[in-house]
Image (spheres, rainbow, N blue to C red):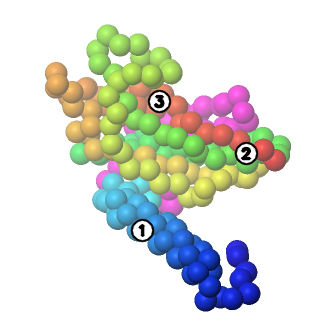
Amino acid sequence: MNVFIEPESREALQTQLKETRQRERLLEEAAYRHYREDTADHALAKLLVTGDIKQTSFIERKKKIVRSEDGAAMVVRIYGGKTKAAVLFTVTNRHPSKPWSLVEARLRTTRPGEDQRPPFLFGEARPFALRADRDEIAPGETGNIAVVVDKSAFVTERGSMRNTTRSTNFVDTPLRHHSLPG
């Protein structure tokens, strides 16, 4: 914040204009992000994150428990529907002092014959909707992250991939996260 003895001076007005433009840019970005994320898939992801699974047409297909080196434990639930697939990650931060937060999530499909083991460096990026119930998970707390994807995302030039919602490859794409210094 700048304080000027003469609030009507040229420098004061330029600073105010610069701050106003920056504030306007941030508001435009937030509005665009909200507009872009206002889809049916995002609404379904929100229902999963809040525990309202019965309000969706999803059926749980598989449940898997994953533990990471950084103290996070995840229960991964894979859901299938007629035209959508979803994954609900319930993350418990078991680190004694550092919060856990999601940095990046990617969904990629691999072609037949490609290496099916992480890390998935290649493959085609696919669109998906993501919702989380919090930005950061404090030590000892649990949070949810939901991913919803249209099954057409698994259609390749050779046709659709079989048993998409039953495949563990849908889950094994790592959610990149970081523990903030604490």
Q: Amino acid at mark 3?
A: Thr
* Label 3 close to label 1 by CB (< 8 Å): no
Tell me how far mark 1 sits from mark 2, CA to CA: 28 Å
Which of the two labelled residues, at mark 3 and mark 1, occupies the earlier sequence position? 1
Q: Residues within 10 Å of mark 2 (few under 14, many from 20)?
A: few
- The residue singled out by tag 2 in the image is 180
Instruction: State whether residue 29 is above or below residue 107.
Output: below
Q: Secondary structure at mark 1?
A: helix
Percent position of residue 27, x then y: 47, 70
Q: Specify the segment rendered in magenta.
A: 48-77
Is residue 11 shown left or right of residue 132? right
Give residue 110's quadrant in the image.
Answer: top left
Q: Residues within 10 Å of mark 1 (few under 14, many from 20)?
A: few
Instruction: State whether residue 91 is above or below residue 119.
Output: below
Which of the two labelled residues, at mark 1 and mark 2, occupies the earlier sequence position? 1
Percent position of residue 58, x then y: 35, 49
Q: Secondary structure at mark 3?
A: loop
- Membership of 180 in magenta stretch: no
Which of the two labelled residues, at mark 3 and mark 2, occupies the earlier sequence position? 3
Tell me how far mark 3 sits from mark 2, CA to CA: 22 Å
Q: Residues within 10 Å of mark 3 (few under 14, many from 20)?
A: some
In percent of the image, x 39 and y 22: which residue is there?
122
Q: Residue furthest top?
A: 113
In this view of the protein, which residue sits in the foreground, 99 or 86?
99
Percent position of residue 90, x then y: 58, 46
**Does any portion of residue 166 appear in the rendered image?**
no
Tell me how far mark 3 sits from mark 1, CA to CA: 32 Å
Q: Amino acid at mark 1?
A: Glu
- The residue singled out by tag 1 in the image is 28
Give residue 78's quadrant in the image.
Answer: top left
Instruction: State whether residue 169 is above or below residue 149.
Output: above
- The residue singled out by tag 3 in the image is 173
